[in-house]
Structures are given as C-alpha cells and as structure tokens.
Amino acid sequence: MILSPSLLSADFSRLAEELSALEAAGLTWVHLDVMDGAFVPNITFGPPVIAALRRVSGLFFDVHLMVEDPARYLEVFCEAGADLLVIHAEADRHPQRTLAAIRGMGRKAGLALNPGTDVNALRWLAADMDLLLVMGVNPGFSGQSFLPGTYEKIRSARRVLDESGGAGVPIQMDGGACPENAALLAEAGADILVSGSAFFGHKPYDQRLEAFLRPLAGRVARPALSAAAQWKARLPRA
C-alpha cells in the first residue's frame, strides 16, 4: 500500500517543514488538492504554491485537480512540478483527450470519480489512464465521513479495469481513509490511500504511517501497486 497524505490537512504556515517531515518519516508521495471554488465549494492553492514546494521536496507530487475544464491548466501544473495529474470525469467533456495530453507532457494521468458517478465509463478509458481515483466522500472539504458504499464501488472499478485491459492501473481512494479501514480498502482493491486529517492530526508521522501499514502486513502487492511504487518525482534541475 502507498499512503499519500493530503497536504490540505497540514499546517499551512509551515508547508516546507511538513514536506520534510513526511520524507523523514518514510513517506514517498504527497497529495495536493487543487480546488477552484466552482467544481467544488472550496478554494485551495494553485501552481505557484506547488512550484515553491517542488523546489524543496523530493516527494512524488500527486496533484488532484478538482477544477472545471482541467485541460486549460495542464501545462502550468506540469511546469509547476506535478508528477501525476488527476482530472475528474465529471469536470471534463473530453476526458480521453485530456488524459492523452497529460501523458504527452510526460506525466502520469489519473481519472477521478465522484461517489455518484458510475464506473462503467472506465471500459472506454482504461487504456488512457495510469491511475483511477475513487472518491470516498463528496469532494471539497477534509474531515468528512467515509461513505460505506465505496468498498463495493472499488470492487466494481477493479473488475471493470481488469476486464478492459487496465489490470496495471492502480486504484487510489480519497476520503475517509484511516488505519481502521485500511485493510478493508486494500481487500476491496485499493492500492493507494489518501488521508488528510486522519494522518496529519496524529504525530509523529512515522508512527502514523506504521499505523496505516500494520493492518496490511503480509499482504501480497498487486502488480498495479508494484508499478506505482516505482514512479519517481521529476525534480527541478540544479
């Protein structure tokens, strides 16, 4: 399992220090929630903040674009330092074209599905994505309660991907992940967990990482997870 802590729940007055603490604790990914106040009822940060953080961090930048018409912003987020760009199926009229464009820029391409979005569209997009993000809450705010129907949705998504040539596509789950449900999420088919307040609210970070991973001890990693574990950050040139 890969844990990708959501920086939305970190201490915004000391983000560079928070990233350093994550690396020191053994984390390899960080989740960056970009919200525009239109697609979701919240506003967070954009390319300038990500570019500043990229200069001080070697973590894999998992950038979640919760914005309308995300294709408009691909180049600027790539230049800022994103390693993975995840767009929402509900926010893009032509997700296949946008996913292909992300890959064309040399970045990993991900597709996110809101809780109410059916997984069957994945049949036609499995070949175009590097990662699928299943939302466990309605996007917009940290600290929401996990929607229990997410387990079955992850199972369904895994079946659709496997049947459509997407066996190598890892599934990420965002919203409500915690040590208590990590094993159930992994059993359902999740490979990568995003955790905000359930991670950052429990220091020290190395012990919190261990709390997430302990329930998964002895579990054999799926090929999709093994592939994602090899993804590396694109660091700025010295």
Image (spheres, rainbow, N blue to C red):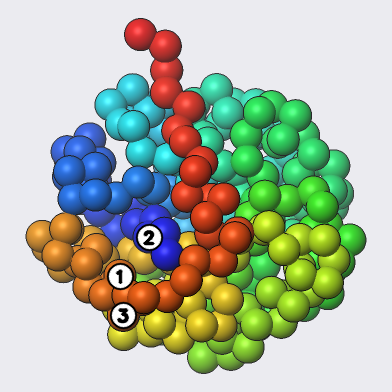
Residue 125's place in the image compared with 137, above or below, is: above
Determine which residue is flagged by label 3: 215
Neighbourhood count class around disc 3 (C-alpha, 10 Å): few under 14, some 14–19, many 20 upward: some
Determine which residue is flagged by label 1: 213
Q: Residue at x 73, y 51 (%)?
A: 129
- Image x and y of residue 91, in percent: 73, 56
Q: Which mark is residue 17?
A: none
Residue 167's place in the image compared with 22, above or below, is: below
User: Which-is-in-front pick, marks 2 and 1?
Assistant: 1
Q: Amino acid at mark 2?
A: Leu
Which residue extends farthest left?
204
User: Which-is-in-front pick, marks 3 and 2?
Assistant: 3
Q: Quadrant of residue 54?
A: top left
Neighbourhood count class around disc 2 (C-alpha, 10 Å): few under 14, some 14–19, many 20 upward: many
Say which element carries label 1. helix
Mark 2–mark 1 CB contact (< 8 Å): yes
Q: Quadrant of residue 39?
A: bottom right
Between 203 and 12, the one lying in front of the other is 203
Q: Amino acid at mark 1?
A: Leu
**Label 3 vs 2, first from the N-terminus:** 2
Say which element carries label 3. helix
Q: Marks 2 and 1, how far apart in space?
A: 9 Å
Determine which residue is flagged by label 2: 3
Mark 1–mark 3 CB contact (< 8 Å): yes
Between 78 and 163, the one lying in front of the other is 163
Question: Is residue 96 in view from this perspective?
Answer: yes
